[in-house]
Amino acid sequence: MLKKFILIALVFTATYANAQQKTPRQLFPGLFEAVQSSDIFPDNKTFVDCTPKYEPGQIMKSFNEQKGKTGFNLREFVLFNFTPPASPTHAFQTNIEEGIRKHIDTLWQVLQRKPDAGSKLSSLAALPNPYIVPGGRFREIYYWDSYFTMLGLQQSHQEKVIGNMIDNFAYLIDTYGFIPNGNRAYYLTRSQPPFFAMMVNLLTKSEGNAILTKYQPQLIKEYNYWMLGAATLTKGKATHRAVRMPDGTLLNRYWDESDEPREESYIKDVDAAKTTTKALPVFYHHIRAAAASGWDFSSRWFTDPAKIGTIQTTDLVPVDLNCLMYNMELTIARSYQVKGNKVQYLLYTAKAAARKKAILKYFWDEKNAWFNDYNWTSNQRSAIPTLAAVFPLEFKIATTAQAKKIADGLKANFLKPGGLVTTLNFSGQQWDAPNGWAPLQYMAIDGLENYGHSTLAKDIATRWMNLNIRVFKQTGKLLEKYNVVDTSLTAGGGEYPLQDGFGWTNGVLLKLMNRYNFEEKKGE
């Protein structure tokens, strides 16, 4: 068993090392820090998405020769040597009178990118097939965003696009050993919430169960990535993304392999590090792990809800991640069932059963009637309730009684005029109150429907759809997130301005409109 684990680890390490692209910080030492610490680009993500016009060695030689000279202008130097990225939607003008469905249908074309030719000078990791980007500053494919985008693509009968995107993710798994946060060199140290199995299951609805066997190799590779190092873990220990719980059960956490500031948010991380008492490598691991969760940032990850310096992401075993892992194990089991491999089917079914038992044991807080994250270092549940609690409903892990309590809690505490708020804390972070996000609205609505709480599910959906459409009629845009508490205000918080586009908002809105036969009212 140990030999098998070592072999898997070596294969993963070799694949990862061989496939690594150099990041902008690695290619342009000194210049990178100078640019990111300046005001040349208001958003740190802009420079790391720029395309160098010349070989990095040539640019660095020029920089080192010129930087100390009188009159050196960093802005002019950067614009001479780099081509800034264009926004995917910058030239798109909406005709509001044509309605929301026409807008979404048109956006599928606006947000679609062609296969990448690939350039050793760009931070972009090439993909072989067309794909949909979220929009705004998000100019590349994003992992968990894409599942919710696919929900809308399916409603638009764009199965070919869905297939292309899943093929791209399979390609990323085969190339890097996992699906990165996005297809950029600076994202190659972390993944995101593992929705690949959900995507594959989505495609089976139109293509049949043969899809499960087609993507079985990649499903297993991704599973091995998340479970790397698990076989040798002792109780109460963690490595990479795996955690061995006190009873010996294996669960997962979010993790990023780097302990340095994120390149795309460099100055934000450097400034945030000034507020912490943690060792900087530890702090940066927590920051990056929160980015891997998709919830960057939220008081969910803090010991003090008001202070990012108290972030503790890698100490937490998240309920939503482990529900996704449970679904991955069941999906792999079904892929073996389709192949007629009973031994492997039973093995992965047993893994899923053990995880389900652990989810109910460690995450369910009977006193507060909520599913909360679990701190594996202190052996205590988190005291911060979040919308991640709906994931056990989406994957039918919760008991009927637990689902009823979650429904009651959502209605009493999380339901606001525009839908569900992400947490109950007004921290100034974007994954907190007063903001609502499309993926979490959908998981809550779908989860409630699984347990027969259809009236509440429809109420949440209606509030969310009305908010989306009202803002669209005012602005001509569908946005990344919304203020669901005061629907007259735009959403705030986060490290960058509000983004429009927006892949997952479009997908969830269209899916919900069709599910509930909802149409926008004309003339309002």
Image (cartoon, rainbow, N blue to C red):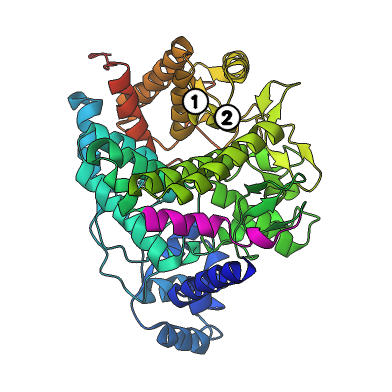
Q: Nearer the viewer, residue 299 or 199?
A: 199
Look at the magenta stretch and give its main secondary structure: helix
| Helix, strand or loop for disc 2 | helix
Left or right: residue 392 versus residue 520 is right
Q: Residue furthest top?
A: 455
Question: Cβ–Cβ below 8 Å for labels 2 and 1?
Answer: yes
Q: Looking at the picture, does residue 126 appear above or below residue 250?
A: below
Number of numbered discs overlaid on the protein picture: 2
Is 233 within the magenta?
yes
The tag on residue 387 is 2
Task: Give the answer, above or below, for where 100 lies relative to 413.
Answer: below
Residue at image position (52%, 61%) is 39
Whole-percent x, y for residue 123 in the image: 41, 68
Depth check, front residue: 187 or 41: 187
Vertical placement of 450 versus 15: above or below? above
Residue neighbourhood size for the residue with mark 1, other residues' Cα within 10 Å, grouped as few (<14), some (14–19), many (≥20): many
Quarter of the image for residue 239 reads bottom right
Residue 422 visible somewhere in the drawing:
yes
Mark 1: amino acid: Ala
Amino acid identity at mark 2: Leu
Residue 45 in the image: x percent, y percent?
47, 58
Q: Quadrant of residue 367?
A: top right
Who's the residue at 58% across and 65% down the image?
Answer: 37
> In this image, 58 relative to 389: left or right?
left
> Which element carries disc 1, helix, strand or loop?
helix
Circle on res. 444: 1
**Range of magenta residues:** 216-234
Q: Measure the alpha-carbon separation of dots 2 and 1.
A: 8 Å
x and y percentages locating residue 114 in the rendered image: 23, 58
